[in-house]
Image (spheres, rainbow, N blue to C red):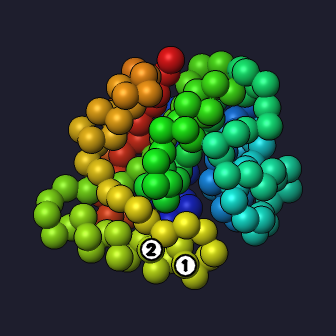
Amino acid sequence: MPTREEIIVQHVAPFLNSRLHVLEIGAGNGLVAEMLHQRVGARFTLLDVVDYNRSAFPLYVNDGRHLPFPDGSFDVTMLIFVLHHNPDPRPVLREALRVSAQGVLLVENDVRGILKKPITQLLDSGEAVRRGVPRCYFTKSVDEWLALLQEIPARGELLSTFKIGWFWHNAVLFAAK
């Protein structure tokens, strides 16, 4: 049975390559970045609100709203299950776009349905509290994520969808200026 990280890597790796320098905002323990590096050879710099980095990659502790990097410092910025932990994800998205030469690779839950949205928030918030990161503020469907990207403004594209277990439906999206 593949781990959560292995499932994520399987669905993100096709969109990365060895030439890329990637900033991962909300990198957590750094294992996804480490596995992606081993699989595709991309270089990573990590950033998160807390430091529980277990990888060899450098980590910056920062909330993502004011990134300490010049414009276009990275080829791609990656946010994996991060945006729903921000009361207003627009500033984080704008900063991610600012420091990215090519764009932003996003992985988020694709949550649909009146009951599934509050259940997802409850389940995700418990895990966040355990790890010391912000709770799940909201959930969105793919269409709602794409609409949010238009507000930035950014061009959003759905790249793929996948599941983790029976409950979690997820989407890989790309945002460009």
Q: Residues within 10 Å of mark 1 (few under 14, many from 20)?
A: few
* Figure quadrant of residue 168: bottom left
Tell me if I can see residue 16 in this picture. no
Q: Mark 2 to mark 1: distance in Å?
A: 6 Å
Tell me if I can see residue 133 in this picture. yes
**Left or right of 86 on screen, residue 55:** right
- Residue 90, compared with residue 151, is above or below; it is below
Point 37% across, 76% down: residue: 123
Point 63% across, 75% down: residue: 132
* Figure quadrant of residue 52: bottom right
Q: Nearer the viewer, residue 18 or 171?
A: 171
Specify the farthest residue to the left: 114
Q: Residues within 10 Å of mark 2 (few under 14, many from 20)?
A: some
Instruction: Name which residue type carries label 2.
Output: Ser
Instruction: Name which residue type carries label 1.
Output: Val
Residue 129 - label: 1
Q: Nearer the viewer, residue 122 or 34?
A: 122
| Residue 127 in picture, x, y percent from top left | 50, 77
Q: Which residue is mark 2?
A: 125
| Residue 110 in picture, x, y percent from top left | 29, 52
**Left or right of 103 on screen, residue 162:** left
Point 64% across, 25% down: residue: 98
Task: Answer whether labels 2 and 1 touch (C-beta < 8 Å).
Answer: yes
